[in-house]
Every structure is written in C-alpha cells, then in structure tokens.
Amino acid sequence: MSNGLPKGKVSPPMRIKSAFWKILVLFLLLVGSGYAEDPKELIALKKDFEASPAKNTEAAREQYIVSLIHLWEKYKEVYESTGKKAGGNEMWAVDLEIANRPALKDYNPSPRLLLGDWEGARYGTRYFADNKWIMLPADDCIIHGKWKISQNEFFNNYSDWGDKFDSGSPIYLLNHDFFVFGDQKGVYIKKRVPYGTYGKE
C-alpha cells in the first residue's frame, strides 16, 4: 500500500524516529563501553580486591562487601547533604558492584542473625523469631508482614498478601552488623541498630 510519498522518500516524522533510535543506541553503546565511569574510590577498591590472592574465598568477599558498604554510606551522606543533587550515581555504582559479587555456594548464614532492629535507607525494620517483621518506628507501625530465609535467599511478605511471599532475593551479606540483599535491579543495605533506638536521637 502506498503512503503517498515518492518511492525512496521518508516522511519527516519517520526521519525523526530514525534519528531518535540512532541517538539512543549510541548512548547505550557509550554507557556499555565504560563512558559512564565508576567513581575513583570504587575503582581503587575493585583493583585491590582483584589483586588479592584470597579474592576467591568467602572471607575475602565478605570483607570486600563491608568495604563497599562503607563507601556507599559515604556517598549517601553526600546525597543527603546536597539535597539529592550529588552522590546518587555513585551509590548506584556501588549497588551494581555488590550485585556482581554473589556469595559462594557454601555461604549459609544463620537466619537468627536477622533478628532485631535494622536501619535501611528509607525506614527501619524489626525482625522477630516467629518470622514476622514490622516497619519502624514501632509506635507508628502500620506496615508488617512475614519473612523467611532459604538457601541463601531472603523472602518477604506483606500482611495483605496472605501466605504468599515474593520471589526471593540473593543475600550478599548477613552478619552481626549488616544485612545486604537484592539483585541487579536494586540492592538493599540494612545496618543493625540497638533494639528500640531506631528514630530516637
């Protein structure tokens, strides 16, 4: 069917579409080729970890994740102090690096390590031994649910889901100080705080 244009001619809207897709493809190629470089501090951490003779051990990986968390916290302070104008890209870069460092197959932290109060980027959480959780501060709690850990994956449930859980997220670190889980779409970093102190300064 003819579109009313001479053979070989392209309408202006089609030329605009074509140009848009070319620009988009070029942008993706630039990003994928390293045009969007990692922060210098992150590059240095990665270099030191890769050069370590113990890099393939779980202990070295866990220590590396802790170092990445401290760097993430540094960028978070910048993000908050600048009114979200700086530090966000750096935080995302650290998230991606954590997601690229999954735990080894024999990593199997005790679920009991999760019990207690944790501070996240946006809110706090208290995990109970009966596999329930509430959002903190507890006095204002209206959001709650259930949790479980199986084969180094964290599963979450909200109270209005019934007995259904989400599809689960890999655990990158769970110890007495930090709980880190997520995937390539997003990494969640929680820091343990003394019981009952979240939101109280």
Image: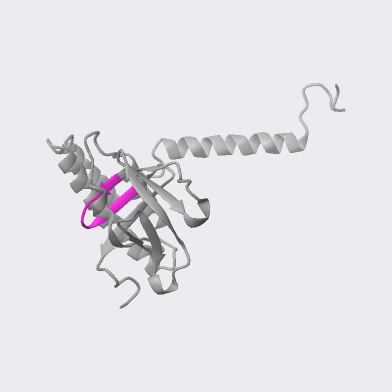
**Residue placed most toward the observer, 72 or 58:** 58
* Residue at the (24%, 52%) spot, across then down: 112
Judged left or right of residue 56, residue 134 is right
Q: Main secondary structure of the magenta part?
A: strand
Position of residue 125 measured from the top left corner of the image (x, y, whole percent): 36, 62
Position of residue 133 measured from the top left corner of the image (x, y, whole percent): 38, 59
**Residue placed most toward the observer, 153 or 10:** 153
User: What sort of colour scheme is used for the picture?
Assistant: one colour
Judged left or right of residue 47, residue 73 is right
Report the label total: 0
Position of residue 90 measured from the top left corner of the image (x, y, whole percent): 36, 53
Q: Is residue 21 above or below residue 41?
A: above
Residue sticking out furthest to the bottom: 201
Please identify the quarter of the rendering in which residue 7 is found.
top right
Quadrant that contains the C terminus? bottom left
Quadrant that contains the N terminus? top right
Magenta stretch: includes residue 152: no
* Residue at the (32%, 70%) spot, across then down: 198
Judged left or right of residue 20, residue 55 is left
Which residues are drawn in magenta?
172-181
**Residue placed most toward the observer, 154 or 62:** 154
Q: Is residue 172 above or below residue 192?
A: above
Position of residue 111 measured from the top left corner of the image (x, y, whole percent): 27, 49
* Residue at the (69%, 38%) spot, across then down: 16
